[in-house]
């Protein structure tokens, strides 16, 4: 059973997202890398990922109107300075990340007040929002689940035991100061008494329980802890920001020139002014700031206050880096397996008074006979003529013989024709292309076939159709070193000829796959099999068992085709190059 702790919250309408100054923290010991949210099993999980492991538990506080939860990370920076994230979640509307004064605040904008649990996992703070439970809560109280069981390492202080009855809050805070050796400064508004009994609890958790019970919050700077009401701290931070904002309005402007190595100057200009087209894009320059991009020399000319110039310098240092490249090798294998067999027959009968001729062809076996009309020599057509057809330019083999009487005056001639063809073929196409990460690449090779087409005036013009082998691919390199490929492969060839022109035989594969670096994947295959069996015969006679083969021909065809596509991505070695920026002018 997970333990739960209860925090008293102040019903205030003060926003938890104070207008904090956006500064690039270059000297902080840690940085906020990214935030993300996801719904699962009725709960909403919000993850704050840092660049380095999180030391200790961050300070947090909540309000009811509006419903928000805030986390403060001391000595922590945020490269963007300030960002707003929107989520379509059951319990969470969005989140604000703001960096100011050497620390970063993450504010969760809730749809309603809900219990939550926190857990520190190496460099991540995991916040679990539970759906509201049907609990009989006292007015002005919100149930907050403790993260002690889920994350024992969230509190790392030395353990202590407290047992006080109606003790002054100031006296209790003095006990914490003497136990930890830290300097504690309290606001004049810290008043009241408290009764508590805590046994073997980390001192930082015990202090947080006391602060939550009295609606207080703390800020730590080195070995000094300042404690005041939450609203007072929020108001002080707001005043500090307004004061810095007024100073920035009077601060003199400076100019710097940045020479870009890998990014286009105009693209970076649009990102700095918030015109990149991305959702939620922010302007990084102040209201007084201005910049110009020179596309010829690929330089940026920026004029702004010193703090904003430092932000621009840090931003460019992060994005002006070489893009990794990917070599995509494709192997398109097209295999053919054909088999054909033709059997045919010629059968004739004739009579004559001369000697018989012999040969290997039907015309020699059944010689010419005198024409009954004019006495001239002529040929006798066969009674059954069903020869085997030729295949792929090859003529069928023939075997002929004749039967005749003793005086060679009557002939029965027979010719058998047969042809069998068996063919196997394999066509391998291997296009290769190199492209940058997330950049579409296209390579194609083929033939443009001409055909005639009618124009609007009625004249005839020559147009062209492409019969190409085309590979279109967009790679995306994952943080784990794998490659996501958006692939579109076309294998076109010339088909049959029609009155309107040539037909195009098309084979097309489009898909998205995840492949290991240097691994090979088969993204698809097309298998076709065509079988045919055609019989031509003399009615009735062709159906006689055994002898019926003398009165018919048989044609059998089997054609198999298969298309396979293999892909192998290879990531080029990363280039460890640091962008060089021009000095300020």
Image: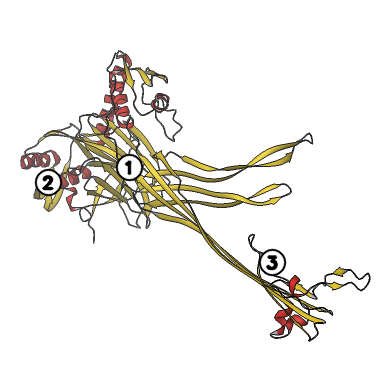
Q: Is residue 121 visible?
A: yes
Instruction: Left or right? Give the position of 168 relative to 295.
Output: left
Secondary structure category for the residue under label 3: loop
Instruction: Left or right? Give the position of 510 relative to 147.
Output: right
Which residue is at a point 31% across and 33% down the rendered structure image?
A: 98
Q: Which residue is mark 3?
A: 389
User: Which badge, 2 or 1, comes first in the chain's sequence?
Assistant: 1
Which residue is at a point 33% across and 53% down the rendered structure image?
A: 130
Rendered view: 475 above or below 262: below
Give percent across and percent down for residue 104. Answer: 26, 35
Give percent across and percent down for residue 415. Answer: 71, 75
Q: Which residue is mark 2?
A: 157
Q: CA distance from mark 2 to mark 3?
A: 95 Å
Q: Which residue is mark 1?
A: 35
Rendered view: 308 above or below 115: above
Question: Can you tell which of label 2 and label 3 is closer to the viewer?
Answer: 3
User: Which badge, 1 or 3, comes first in the chain's sequence?
Assistant: 1
Q: Nearer the viewer, residue 394 or 86?
A: 394
């Amino acid at each position: 059973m997970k333990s739960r702790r209860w925090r008293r919250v102040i019903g205030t309408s003060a926003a938890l997202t104070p207008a904090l100054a956006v500064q690039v923290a270059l000297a902080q010991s840690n940085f906020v890398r990214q935030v993300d949210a996801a719904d699962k099993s009725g709960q909403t999980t919000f993850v704050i990922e840092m660049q380095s492991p999180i030391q200790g538990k961050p300070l947090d506080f909540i309000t009811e109107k509006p419903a928000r939860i805030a986390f403060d990370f001391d000595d922590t920076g945020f490269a963007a300075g300030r960002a707003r994230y929107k989520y379509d979640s059951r319990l969470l509307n969005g989140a604000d990340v703001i960096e100011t004064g050497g620390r970063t605040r993450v504010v969760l904008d809730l749809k309603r007040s809900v219990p939550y649990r926190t857990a520190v996992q190496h460099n991540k703070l995991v916040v679990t929002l539970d759906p509201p439970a049907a609990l009989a809560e006292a007015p002005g109280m919100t149930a907050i689940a403790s993260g002690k069981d889920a994350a024992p390492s969230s509190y790392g202080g030395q353990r202590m035991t407290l047992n006080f009855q109606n003790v002054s809050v100031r006296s209790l805070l003095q006990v914490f100061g003497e136990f930890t050796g830290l300097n504690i400064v309290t606001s004049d508004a810290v008043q009241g008494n408290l009764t508590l009994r805590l046994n073997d609890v980390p001192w930082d958790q015990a202090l947080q329980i006391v602060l939550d019970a009295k609606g207080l919050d703390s800020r730590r700077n080195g070995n000094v802890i300042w404690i005041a009401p939450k609203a007072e701290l929020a108001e002080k931070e707001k005043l500090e920001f307004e004061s810095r904002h007024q100073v920035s309005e009077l601060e003199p402007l400076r100019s710097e020139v940045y020479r870009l190595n890998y990014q286009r100057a105009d693209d970076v200009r649009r990102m700095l002014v918030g015109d990149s087209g991305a959702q939620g894009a922010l302007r990084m320059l102040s209201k007084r700031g201005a910049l110009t991009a020179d596309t010829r020399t690929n330089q940026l000319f920026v004029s702004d206050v010193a703090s904003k110039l430092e932000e621009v310098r840090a931003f460019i240092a992060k994005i002006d880096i070489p893009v990794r490249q990917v070599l995509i090798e494709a192997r398109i294998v097209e295999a053919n397996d054909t088999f054909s067999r033709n059997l045919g027959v010629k059968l004739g009968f004739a009579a004559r008074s001369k000697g018989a001729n012999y040969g290997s062809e039907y015309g020699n076996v059944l010689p010419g006979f005198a024409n009954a009309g004019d006495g001239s020599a002529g040929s006798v057509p066969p009674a059954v003529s069903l020869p085997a057809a030729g295949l792929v330019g090859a003529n069928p083999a023939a075997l002929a013989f004749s039967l005749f009487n003793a005086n060679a005056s009557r002939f029965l001639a027979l010719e058998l024709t047969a042809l069998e063809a068996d063919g196997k073929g394999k066509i391998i196409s291997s296009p290769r292309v190199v492209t940058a990460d997330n950049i579409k690449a296209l390579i194609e090779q083929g033939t443009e076939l001409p055909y005639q087409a009618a124009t609007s005036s009625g004249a005839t013009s020559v147009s062209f159709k492409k019969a190409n082998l085309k590979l279109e691919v967009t790679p995306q390199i994952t943080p784990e070193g794998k490659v996501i490929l958006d692939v579109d492969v076309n294998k076109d060839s010339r088909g049959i000829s029609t009155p309107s022109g040539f037909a195009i035989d098309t084979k097309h594969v489009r898909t998205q796959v995840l492949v290991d670096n240097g691994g090979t994947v088969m993204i698809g295959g097309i298998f076709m099999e065509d079988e045919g069996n055609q019989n031509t015969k003399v009615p009735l006679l062709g159906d006689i068992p055994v002898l019926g083969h003398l009165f018919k021909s048989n044609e059998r065809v089997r054609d198999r085709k298969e298309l396979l596509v293999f892909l192998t991505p290879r990531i080029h070695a990363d280039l460890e190059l640091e962008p060089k920026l021009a000095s300020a002018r």
